[in-house]
Image (cartoon, rainbow, N blue to C red):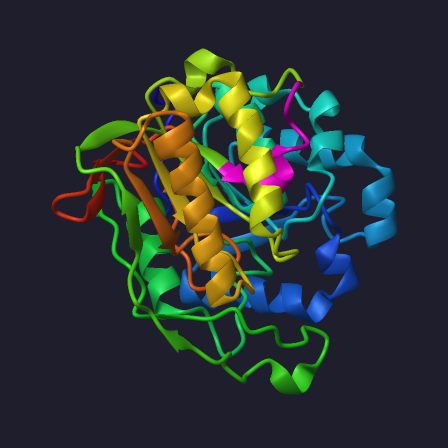
Amino acid sequence: MRPASTPRHLDPGDTVAVVSPSWGGPGAIPRRYAMGKRELEQRFGFRVVEMPHALKDPEWVRAHPWERAEDLHVAFADPGIKAVFASIGGDDAIRVLPHLDSGVMAANPKVFLGYSDTAMIHLAAYGAGLQTFYGPSVMSGIAENGGMFAYAERWFRKVLMTPEPVGRLEPAEAWTEERLEWTDPLLENQQRALRKSDGWVWLQGDVKAEGHLLGGCLDTLETAKGTPWWPPLEAWRGAIFFWETSEESPKPPLVERWLLNYAAQGILTVIAGMLIGRPRWYTLEERADLFRRLKDLLGRELGRPDLPIVAEMDFGHTDPMFILPYGARTIIDPRERVVSLPDPAVT
């Protein structure tokens, strides 16, 4: 089920707006926000404008979810703004949704980018028929110690700035989960320690699958279950369910309990495939435990050993990351070990 409204691609010189739909990160750590803004302006040639409440103190931002929604309305309704980027994630974007008119977003299709808690805004937009993008935020993924990773920049340009088919997704050669203190200006030019990638993990399934992308950060998606913004079962039918976990590093037993709810809803019975982002700060033992629980749940309990599952992918809370367009047609080919997006993500 591809959203009806696909946004226009971005060009150098375009105006992009920054919103803070979750945490007021720019007000808390302005130097980190300035790093991301500088990347957008100097690396990509965009003109960056902040919505009226995007830079306010984080306590003020938390107390005013309706103002966060209004920033989204203003950004999408302004014809001079070509894209809207989340400054950072957080933990309470669900409080914005009762105040959000997602019809304003769908009526003015433009690139909307962010990840983690921003998944709440993505769900509202998806329900209204707008294709949005699960990927880096201004302060995390665009801002980066020593400059944006080349891998992340390449996928940013490929997905958002080129009206050509996205094509085959490819693993990063190296990745990082190191935390360097954002408030220390002496660390801004110190690149985080990278680990060589062993590639993605093909957990199970040997039959090619095709479907539309739907998902987000599991921690955040928990807050949407049972609300008007939760996709109905038909929206999940034939979907490629993509998910990842936050920097809070929820352990495999908790992740399994969350997924048991998806099973109880019937979601894991009707999806066509599953893509899983690399968990942050997991030990090798925890990774193995998660994989065992997944295969046991899908393969034994639900009788779906055919369901293709690809894990340790480069999206979510490790860096660098690629960008996933909500609703985009996606093909998983286990025999060739290829995941591809055969259509353009933007017009």
Q: Is residue 204 above or below residue 180?
A: above
Task: Give how far across and how far down residue 64 sits, in percent.
Answer: 84, 37
Q: Is residue 228 above or below residue 41?
A: above
Where residue 185 sits, quadrant-wise, is bottom right
Left/right of residue 230 with respect to residue 111 in the rendered view: right
Q: Residue furthest front?
A: 300
The N terminus sits in image quarter: top left
181 and 49: which one is in front? 181
Residue at x-position 82% and y-position 43%? 62
Q: Residue furthest bottom?
A: 186
Q: Residue furthest left?
A: 336
Q: Is residue 188 above or below residue 303?
A: below
Q: Which residues are magenta?
A: 216-226
Residue at x-position 35% and y-position 69%? 150
Task: Give how far across and how far down residue 207 sits, in percent.
Answer: 17, 33
Q: Is residue 57 above or below residue 237?
A: below
Whether residue 342 is visible to the viewer of this picture, yes or no, is no
Whether residue 310 is visible to the viewer of this picture, yes or no, is yes
Task: Give how far across and how far down residue 219 sits, in percent.
Answer: 62, 42
217 and 327: which one is in front? 217
Left/right of residue 321 with respect to residue 221 in the rendered view: left
The C terminus sits in image quarter: top left
Asked if residue 329 lies in the magenta stretch, the reply is no
